[in-house]
Amino acid sequence: MLELDLRRRGFDPVSEMSSSAAFERLKTEDADVVLTDLNLPGMNGIVLCEQIAANRPDVPVIVITAFGSLETAVAAIRAGAYDFVTKPVDTDVLALSLGRAVGHRRLREQVTLLNRTVEQLQPYDELIGRSLPMRGMFDRLSRISETEASVLITGETGTGKELVARVLHKRSARRKDPFVPVDCASLPESLLESELFGHARGAFTDARTARKGLFLQANGGTMFLDEIGDLPLSLQPKLLRAIEGRSVRPVGGDAEVSFDARLIAATNQDLESAVEEGRFREDLFYRLNVIPVRVPPLRARGTDILLLAQHFLERYAADSRRDVTGISVQAADRLLGYSWPGNVRELRNVIERAVALTRFEKIAVDDLPKKIRSYRQTQVMLGGDNPAELVTLEEVERRYILHVLRAVGDNKTLAAKMLGLDRKTLYRKLQRYEE
Protein backbone atom coordinates (compact mmCIF):
# COMPACT_ATOMS: atom_id res chain seq x y z
CA MET A 1 0.00 0.00 0.00
CA LEU A 2 2.80 2.43 0.87
CA GLU A 3 4.62 1.57 -2.35
CA LEU A 4 1.52 2.32 -4.44
CA ASP A 5 0.81 5.55 -2.58
CA LEU A 6 4.42 6.80 -2.83
CA ARG A 7 4.57 5.97 -6.53
CA ARG A 8 1.49 8.16 -7.08
CA ARG A 9 3.34 10.97 -5.28
CA GLY A 10 6.28 10.83 -7.69
CA PHE A 11 8.66 8.53 -5.78
CA ASP A 12 10.19 5.41 -7.30
CA PRO A 13 10.06 2.87 -4.45
CA VAL A 14 11.59 -0.60 -4.47
CA SER A 15 10.52 -3.01 -1.72
CA GLU A 16 12.08 -6.05 -0.04
CA MET A 17 10.41 -8.51 2.33
CA SER A 18 13.25 -8.61 4.90
CA SER A 19 15.91 -6.29 6.28
CA SER A 20 18.72 -8.68 5.35
CA ALA A 21 17.56 -8.76 1.71
CA ALA A 22 17.33 -4.96 1.68
CA PHE A 23 20.83 -4.61 3.14
CA GLU A 24 22.30 -7.02 0.58
CA ARG A 25 20.64 -5.09 -2.23
CA LEU A 26 22.04 -1.83 -0.87
CA LYS A 27 25.56 -3.26 -1.23
CA THR A 28 25.25 -3.37 -5.01
CA GLU A 29 22.58 -0.76 -5.78
CA ASP A 30 22.06 2.84 -4.78
CA ALA A 31 19.09 4.43 -3.03
CA ASP A 32 18.23 7.98 -1.99
CA VAL A 33 16.60 6.87 1.27
CA VAL A 34 15.67 3.69 3.15
CA LEU A 35 12.25 3.35 4.83
CA THR A 36 11.96 0.50 7.32
CA ASP A 37 9.68 -0.83 10.04
CA LEU A 38 11.22 -1.73 13.40
CA ASN A 39 9.58 -5.08 13.97
CA LEU A 40 11.03 -7.29 11.29
CA PRO A 41 11.98 -10.98 11.16
CA GLY A 42 15.72 -11.60 11.61
CA MET A 43 17.62 -8.31 11.72
CA ASN A 44 15.27 -5.71 13.22
CA GLY A 45 15.03 -2.07 12.16
CA ILE A 46 17.47 -0.78 14.81
CA VAL A 47 20.21 -3.20 13.73
CA LEU A 48 19.52 -2.35 10.08
CA CYS A 49 19.98 1.34 10.94
CA GLU A 50 23.31 0.60 12.59
CA GLN A 51 24.49 -1.49 9.63
CA ILE A 52 23.54 1.18 7.08
CA ALA A 53 25.11 3.95 9.19
CA ALA A 54 28.35 1.94 9.37
CA ASN A 55 28.50 0.82 5.75
CA ARG A 56 26.47 3.39 3.77
CA PRO A 57 26.48 6.58 5.88
CA ASP A 58 25.46 8.56 2.80
CA VAL A 59 22.01 6.92 2.73
CA PRO A 60 19.48 8.34 5.23
CA VAL A 61 17.14 5.93 7.03
CA ILE A 62 13.55 6.67 8.11
CA VAL A 63 12.09 4.31 10.72
CA ILE A 64 8.40 3.50 11.26
CA THR A 65 7.68 3.11 14.97
CA ALA A 66 4.63 2.30 17.06
CA PHE A 67 2.56 5.29 18.16
CA GLY A 68 3.75 6.76 21.45
CA SER A 69 6.92 4.62 21.63
CA LEU A 70 9.31 7.46 22.42
CA GLU A 71 12.05 5.16 23.72
CA THR A 72 12.09 3.21 20.46
CA ALA A 73 12.21 6.42 18.42
CA VAL A 74 15.17 7.69 20.47
CA ALA A 75 16.93 4.35 20.02
CA ALA A 76 16.44 4.61 16.25
CA ILE A 77 17.91 8.11 16.13
CA ARG A 78 20.88 6.97 18.22
CA ALA A 79 21.38 4.08 15.82
CA GLY A 80 21.75 6.59 12.98
CA ALA A 81 18.21 7.06 11.67
CA TYR A 82 17.55 10.35 9.89
CA ASP A 83 13.90 10.56 11.02
CA PHE A 84 10.99 8.47 12.27
CA VAL A 85 7.24 8.34 11.62
CA THR A 86 4.60 6.75 13.85
CA LYS A 87 1.86 4.24 13.12
CA PRO A 88 -0.74 4.54 11.75
CA VAL A 89 1.34 6.11 8.96
CA ASP A 90 0.12 9.47 7.65
CA THR A 91 1.31 9.34 4.03
CA ASP A 92 1.38 13.15 3.80
CA VAL A 93 3.77 13.30 6.76
CA LEU A 94 5.77 10.38 5.36
CA ALA A 95 6.11 11.98 1.92
CA LEU A 96 7.32 15.21 3.55
CA SER A 97 9.91 13.30 5.60
CA LEU A 98 11.09 11.35 2.54
CA GLY A 99 11.44 14.57 0.54
CA ARG A 100 13.54 16.14 3.30
CA ALA A 101 15.71 13.00 3.49
CA VAL A 102 16.35 13.04 -0.26
CA GLY A 103 17.25 16.74 -0.08
CA HIS A 104 19.50 16.01 2.90
CA ARG A 105 21.38 13.33 0.97
CA ARG A 106 21.85 15.50 -2.10
CA LEU A 107 23.14 18.37 0.02
CA ARG A 108 25.50 15.98 1.75
CA GLU A 109 26.81 14.78 -1.62
CA GLN A 110 27.25 18.39 -2.66
CA VAL A 111 29.25 19.21 0.50
CA THR A 112 31.50 16.19 -0.12
CA LEU A 113 32.01 17.22 -3.73
CA LEU A 114 32.80 20.79 -2.72
CA ASN A 115 35.34 19.60 -0.15
CA ARG A 116 37.10 17.65 -2.90
CA THR A 117 36.82 20.63 -5.25
CA VAL A 118 38.59 22.92 -2.77
CA GLU A 119 41.45 20.43 -2.58
CA GLN A 120 41.77 20.28 -6.37
CA LEU A 121 40.88 23.88 -7.17
CA GLN A 122 43.60 26.15 -8.51
CA PRO A 123 42.07 29.40 -7.29
CA TYR A 124 42.32 32.63 -9.24
CA ASP A 125 44.84 33.61 -6.57
CA GLU A 126 42.55 34.08 -3.56
CA LEU A 127 39.42 34.60 -5.69
CA ILE A 128 37.52 31.34 -5.34
CA GLY A 129 34.29 30.55 -7.15
CA ARG A 130 32.60 28.39 -9.76
CA SER A 131 29.25 30.20 -9.97
CA LEU A 132 28.08 31.85 -13.18
CA PRO A 133 28.58 35.44 -11.86
CA MET A 134 32.16 34.63 -10.81
CA ARG A 135 32.97 32.89 -14.09
CA GLY A 136 31.79 36.01 -15.90
CA MET A 137 34.02 38.19 -13.72
CA PHE A 138 37.02 35.87 -14.21
CA ASP A 139 36.53 36.09 -17.97
CA ARG A 140 36.58 39.87 -17.83
CA LEU A 141 39.66 39.94 -15.59
CA SER A 142 41.54 37.66 -17.97
CA ARG A 143 40.78 40.02 -20.87
CA ILE A 144 41.74 43.28 -19.13
CA SER A 145 44.66 42.30 -16.90
CA GLU A 146 47.29 43.10 -19.55
CA THR A 147 45.74 46.42 -20.58
CA GLU A 148 46.76 49.83 -19.22
CA ALA A 149 43.20 51.21 -19.08
CA SER A 150 41.76 52.50 -15.82
CA VAL A 151 39.41 50.09 -14.04
CA LEU A 152 36.51 50.86 -11.71
CA ILE A 153 35.61 47.96 -9.43
CA THR A 154 32.16 48.16 -7.87
CA GLY A 155 30.40 45.93 -5.37
CA GLU A 156 28.98 45.79 -1.88
CA THR A 157 31.14 46.07 1.22
CA GLY A 158 32.99 42.84 1.96
CA THR A 159 32.84 41.35 -1.55
CA GLY A 160 36.63 41.47 -2.06
CA LYS A 161 37.17 44.49 -4.32
CA GLU A 162 40.78 45.03 -3.18
CA LEU A 163 41.48 41.33 -3.82
CA VAL A 164 40.23 41.78 -7.40
CA ALA A 165 42.53 44.81 -7.80
CA ARG A 166 45.51 42.80 -6.53
CA VAL A 167 44.73 39.99 -8.97
CA LEU A 168 44.68 42.49 -11.83
CA HIS A 169 48.06 43.83 -10.71
CA LYS A 170 49.61 40.35 -10.32
CA ARG A 171 48.50 39.37 -13.82
CA SER A 172 49.64 42.58 -15.49
CA ALA A 173 52.99 43.54 -16.99
CA ARG A 174 53.50 45.73 -13.89
CA ARG A 175 53.48 42.79 -11.48
CA LYS A 176 57.13 43.28 -10.44
CA ASP A 177 56.53 46.90 -9.44
CA PRO A 178 54.59 48.25 -6.42
CA PHE A 179 50.90 47.83 -5.73
CA VAL A 180 50.01 50.89 -3.64
CA PRO A 181 46.56 50.95 -1.97
CA VAL A 182 44.97 53.96 -0.28
CA ASP A 183 41.61 54.11 1.51
CA CYS A 184 40.00 57.43 0.54
CA ALA A 185 37.42 57.07 3.35
CA SER A 186 39.81 56.59 6.27
CA LEU A 187 41.91 59.78 6.03
CA PRO A 188 40.89 63.42 6.68
CA GLU A 189 40.95 65.68 3.63
CA SER A 190 44.14 67.56 4.52
CA LEU A 191 46.08 64.37 5.20
CA LEU A 192 44.66 62.56 2.17
CA GLU A 193 45.91 65.29 -0.20
CA SER A 194 49.41 65.01 1.25
CA GLU A 195 49.28 61.19 1.11
CA LEU A 196 48.25 61.13 -2.53
CA PHE A 197 50.35 63.94 -3.97
CA GLY A 198 53.14 64.34 -1.41
CA HIS A 199 54.29 67.63 0.11
CA ALA A 200 57.23 70.00 -0.05
CA ARG A 201 59.35 70.86 2.93
CA GLY A 202 57.62 73.54 5.05
CA ALA A 203 54.30 73.09 3.26
CA PHE A 204 52.53 72.97 6.63
CA THR A 205 53.34 72.65 10.32
CA ASP A 206 55.57 69.63 11.03
CA ALA A 207 56.48 69.24 7.34
CA ARG A 208 60.21 69.30 8.19
CA THR A 209 61.16 67.26 5.15
CA ALA A 210 59.71 66.77 1.68
CA ARG A 211 57.65 63.61 1.21
CA LYS A 212 56.93 61.65 -1.94
CA GLY A 213 53.20 60.98 -2.39
CA LEU A 214 51.61 57.60 -3.09
CA PHE A 215 51.25 58.30 -6.82
CA LEU A 216 55.02 58.60 -7.08
CA GLN A 217 55.53 55.59 -4.80
CA ALA A 218 53.38 53.58 -7.23
CA ASN A 219 55.59 54.60 -10.17
CA GLY A 220 55.86 51.67 -12.60
CA GLY A 221 53.18 49.72 -10.75
CA THR A 222 49.51 50.06 -9.82
CA MET A 223 47.75 52.75 -7.78
CA PHE A 224 44.59 51.47 -6.05
CA LEU A 225 42.11 54.08 -4.82
CA ASP A 226 39.68 52.27 -2.52
CA GLU A 227 36.34 53.85 -1.55
CA ILE A 228 36.78 56.46 -4.28
CA GLY A 229 33.17 57.54 -3.77
CA ASP A 230 34.23 59.09 -0.44
CA LEU A 231 36.91 61.29 -2.01
CA PRO A 232 36.16 64.89 -0.94
CA LEU A 233 34.66 66.98 -3.74
CA SER A 234 37.41 69.60 -3.30
CA LEU A 235 40.13 67.02 -4.13
CA GLN A 236 38.40 65.59 -7.17
CA PRO A 237 39.63 68.28 -9.66
CA LYS A 238 43.24 67.74 -8.53
CA LEU A 239 42.90 63.98 -8.92
CA LEU A 240 41.42 64.44 -12.39
CA ARG A 241 44.35 66.65 -13.43
CA ALA A 242 46.81 64.09 -12.08
CA ILE A 243 45.17 61.24 -14.04
CA GLU A 244 44.94 63.19 -17.29
CA GLY A 245 48.42 64.75 -17.08
CA ARG A 246 50.13 61.70 -15.51
CA SER A 247 51.82 64.12 -13.11
CA VAL A 248 51.27 65.49 -9.59
CA ARG A 249 52.13 68.72 -7.82
CA PRO A 250 53.07 68.13 -4.18
CA VAL A 251 51.31 70.23 -1.54
CA GLY A 252 53.31 73.46 -1.20
CA GLY A 253 55.39 72.65 -4.29
CA ASP A 254 55.82 74.60 -7.52
CA ALA A 255 56.75 71.92 -10.04
CA GLU A 256 54.81 69.04 -11.55
CA VAL A 257 56.37 65.59 -11.11
CA SER A 258 55.56 62.88 -13.64
CA PHE A 259 54.52 59.37 -12.66
CA ASP A 260 53.70 56.15 -14.52
CA ALA A 261 51.14 53.99 -12.74
CA ARG A 262 48.02 52.13 -13.76
CA LEU A 263 44.96 53.39 -11.91
CA ILE A 264 42.39 51.06 -10.34
CA ALA A 265 39.57 52.49 -8.23
CA ALA A 266 36.85 50.79 -6.19
CA THR A 267 33.63 51.82 -4.50
CA ASN A 268 30.57 50.35 -2.83
CA GLN A 269 28.56 53.42 -3.83
CA ASP A 270 26.45 54.08 -6.92
CA LEU A 271 28.69 56.70 -8.56
CA GLU A 272 26.21 57.39 -11.36
CA SER A 273 23.69 58.44 -8.72
CA ALA A 274 26.40 60.46 -6.94
CA VAL A 275 27.11 62.27 -10.22
CA GLU A 276 23.42 63.14 -10.69
CA GLU A 277 23.22 64.34 -7.08
CA GLY A 278 26.33 66.53 -7.49
CA ARG A 279 28.48 64.56 -5.03
CA PHE A 280 30.94 63.30 -7.63
CA ARG A 281 32.37 64.96 -10.73
CA GLU A 282 31.06 63.53 -13.98
CA ASP A 283 34.38 64.02 -15.85
CA LEU A 284 36.28 62.19 -13.09
CA PHE A 285 33.73 59.35 -13.14
CA TYR A 286 34.27 58.78 -16.86
CA ARG A 287 38.06 58.87 -16.46
CA LEU A 288 37.86 56.18 -13.77
CA ASN A 289 35.14 54.07 -15.36
CA VAL A 290 36.97 53.14 -18.57
CA ILE A 291 36.54 49.42 -17.79
CA PRO A 292 33.90 48.58 -15.15
CA VAL A 293 34.15 45.36 -13.13
CA ARG A 294 31.33 44.42 -10.77
CA VAL A 295 32.04 41.96 -7.96
CA PRO A 296 28.88 39.91 -7.28
CA PRO A 297 27.46 39.78 -3.75
CA LEU A 298 27.87 36.48 -1.92
CA ARG A 299 24.11 35.81 -1.85
CA ALA A 300 24.15 35.68 -5.68
CA ARG A 301 26.94 33.08 -5.83
CA GLY A 302 25.07 29.91 -4.78
CA THR A 303 27.31 27.05 -3.67
CA ASP A 304 30.39 29.29 -3.85
CA ILE A 305 29.40 29.93 -0.23
CA LEU A 306 30.44 26.39 0.69
CA LEU A 307 33.59 26.52 -1.44
CA LEU A 308 34.69 29.67 0.38
CA ALA A 309 33.65 28.29 3.77
CA GLN A 310 35.78 25.18 3.26
CA HIS A 311 38.70 27.33 2.08
CA PHE A 312 38.52 29.51 5.20
CA LEU A 313 38.02 26.45 7.42
CA GLU A 314 41.23 24.84 6.16
CA ARG A 315 43.17 28.07 6.62
CA TYR A 316 42.01 28.74 10.19
CA ALA A 317 42.22 25.09 11.23
CA ALA A 318 45.86 25.05 10.10
CA ASP A 319 46.63 28.40 11.77
CA SER A 320 45.14 27.29 15.11
CA ARG A 321 46.33 23.67 14.77
CA ARG A 322 42.83 22.36 15.30
CA ASP A 323 41.59 19.05 13.89
CA VAL A 324 38.59 20.50 12.04
CA THR A 325 38.10 18.94 8.63
CA GLY A 326 34.72 20.00 7.28
CA ILE A 327 31.19 21.32 7.71
CA SER A 328 28.18 19.23 8.71
CA VAL A 329 25.29 18.98 6.26
CA GLN A 330 22.96 20.82 8.66
CA ALA A 331 25.45 23.68 9.09
CA ALA A 332 26.00 23.85 5.32
CA ASP A 333 22.23 24.15 4.86
CA ARG A 334 22.16 27.15 7.24
CA LEU A 335 25.09 28.79 5.45
CA LEU A 336 23.38 28.41 2.08
CA GLY A 337 20.09 29.80 3.43
CA TYR A 338 21.56 32.98 4.95
CA SER A 339 21.57 36.30 3.03
CA TRP A 340 25.15 37.39 3.93
CA PRO A 341 24.76 41.18 4.15
CA GLY A 342 28.47 41.38 5.06
CA ASN A 343 29.41 39.17 2.09
CA VAL A 344 32.73 37.25 1.98
CA ARG A 345 34.17 39.21 4.92
CA GLU A 346 31.24 38.14 7.11
CA LEU A 347 31.56 34.50 5.99
CA ARG A 348 35.28 34.51 6.79
CA ASN A 349 34.62 35.82 10.30
CA VAL A 350 31.82 33.26 10.86
CA ILE A 351 34.08 30.36 9.86
CA GLU A 352 37.00 31.63 11.94
CA ARG A 353 34.67 31.79 14.96
CA ALA A 354 33.21 28.35 14.26
CA VAL A 355 36.66 26.73 13.95
CA ALA A 356 37.62 28.23 17.30
CA LEU A 357 34.41 27.11 19.05
CA THR A 358 33.65 23.67 17.63
CA ARG A 359 34.27 20.54 19.70
CA PHE A 360 33.99 18.22 16.72
CA GLU A 361 35.80 17.44 13.49
CA LYS A 362 33.02 19.11 11.53
CA ILE A 363 31.45 22.51 12.16
CA ALA A 364 27.94 21.98 13.51
CA VAL A 365 24.87 24.24 13.51
CA ASP A 366 25.49 25.20 17.15
CA ASP A 367 28.91 26.56 16.18
CA LEU A 368 27.27 29.21 13.96
CA PRO A 369 26.02 32.61 15.22
CA LYS A 370 22.40 32.75 16.33
CA LYS A 371 21.42 35.12 13.48
CA ILE A 372 22.45 32.42 10.97
CA ARG A 373 20.93 29.51 12.90
CA SER A 374 17.56 31.23 13.13
CA TYR A 375 17.58 33.10 9.81
CA ARG A 376 14.48 32.89 7.67
CA GLN A 377 14.40 34.27 4.12
CA THR A 378 12.11 37.29 3.90
CA GLN A 379 9.70 37.65 1.03
CA VAL A 380 7.60 40.44 -0.39
CA MET A 381 4.19 39.81 1.18
CA LEU A 382 1.26 40.88 -0.95
CA GLY A 383 -1.49 39.96 1.46
CA GLY A 384 -3.60 36.84 1.97
CA ASP A 385 -7.00 35.77 0.76
CA ASN A 386 -8.77 37.87 3.38
CA PRO A 387 -10.14 40.97 1.59
CA ALA A 388 -9.11 43.06 4.59
CA GLU A 389 -5.45 42.07 3.99
CA LEU A 390 -5.36 42.86 0.25
CA VAL A 391 -3.39 45.94 -0.82
CA THR A 392 -3.52 48.33 -3.77
CA LEU A 393 -1.43 47.88 -6.91
CA GLU A 394 0.52 51.02 -5.95
CA GLU A 395 1.40 49.47 -2.57
CA VAL A 396 2.51 46.23 -4.26
CA GLU A 397 4.79 48.29 -6.53
CA ARG A 398 6.18 50.25 -3.57
CA ARG A 399 7.01 47.08 -1.61
CA TYR A 400 8.63 45.39 -4.59
CA ILE A 401 10.77 48.41 -5.53
CA LEU A 402 12.05 48.70 -1.96
CA HIS A 403 12.67 44.93 -1.87
CA VAL A 404 14.77 45.07 -5.07
CA LEU A 405 16.65 48.11 -3.77
CA ARG A 406 17.60 46.25 -0.57
CA ALA A 407 18.57 43.15 -2.56
CA VAL A 408 21.13 45.11 -4.65
CA GLY A 409 22.67 46.93 -1.69
CA ASP A 410 20.87 50.25 -2.33
CA ASN A 411 22.49 50.59 -5.76
CA LYS A 412 19.88 52.73 -7.51
CA THR A 413 21.39 52.34 -10.96
CA LEU A 414 21.36 48.55 -10.75
CA ALA A 415 17.89 48.54 -9.17
CA ALA A 416 16.55 50.70 -12.02
CA LYS A 417 17.97 48.26 -14.59
CA MET A 418 16.44 45.26 -12.82
CA LEU A 419 13.06 47.01 -12.54
CA GLY A 420 13.11 48.16 -16.17
CA LEU A 421 12.96 51.83 -15.17
CA ASP A 422 15.19 54.77 -15.96
CA ARG A 423 16.96 56.25 -12.93
CA LYS A 424 14.98 59.48 -12.91
CA THR A 425 11.70 57.56 -12.72
CA LEU A 426 13.05 55.46 -9.86
CA TYR A 427 14.22 58.59 -8.00
CA ARG A 428 10.78 60.19 -8.36
CA LYS A 429 9.09 57.09 -6.97
CA LEU A 430 11.51 56.89 -4.02
CA GLN A 431 10.97 60.56 -3.22
CA ARG A 432 7.20 60.00 -3.27
CA TYR A 433 7.59 57.07 -0.82
CA GLU A 434 9.46 59.34 1.60
CA GLU A 435 6.72 62.01 1.63
Image (tube, helix red, strand yellow):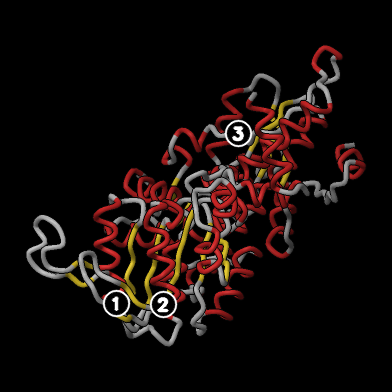
Image side of residue 304 versus residue 316, left or right: right
Q: Which residue position holds label 2?
A: 245
**Residue at left offset 16%, top offset 62%:** 203
Question: Residue under circle 1?
Answer: 256
| Residue at x 79%, y 22% (from the top left corner) | 383
In percent of width and height, residue 422 lies at: 74, 49
- Nearer the camera: disc 2 or disc 3: 2
Measured in 3D between alpha carbons, the distance from the residue under mark 1 to the one under mark 3, in whole angstroms, is 57 Å
Q: Residues within 10 Å of mark 2 (few under 14, many from 20)?
A: few
Task: Look at the numbered disc 3 and give the secondary structure of its residue.
Answer: loop
Q: Is residue 251 left or right of residue 273?
A: left
Q: Residue furthest bottom?
A: 173
**Amino acid on which the number 1 mark rests in the picture:** Glu
Would you say the residues marked 1 and 3 are in contact, meaning their CB atoms lie under 8 Å apart? no
Q: Amino acid at mark 3?
A: Arg
Q: Residues within 10 Å of mark 1 (few under 14, many from 20)?
A: few
Which amino acid lies under the numbered mark 2 shown in the image of this protein? Answer: Gly
Relative placement, left or right, of 18 versus 288 is: right
In the depicted structure, whether residue 227 falls above or below residue 429? below
Q: Measure the C-alpha gap from mark 2 to mark 3.
A: 53 Å
Across and down, in percent, residue 309 comes to: 47, 56
- The answer to whether the residues at label 2 and label 1 have Cβ atoms under 8 Å apart is yes
Q: Is residue 318 above or below residue 189?
A: below
* Residue 405 or residue 332, whichever sits in front: 405
Q: Is residue 382 above or below residue 48?
A: above
Asked which quadrant contains residue 175, the reply is bottom left
Of label 1 and label 3, which has the lower sequence position?
1
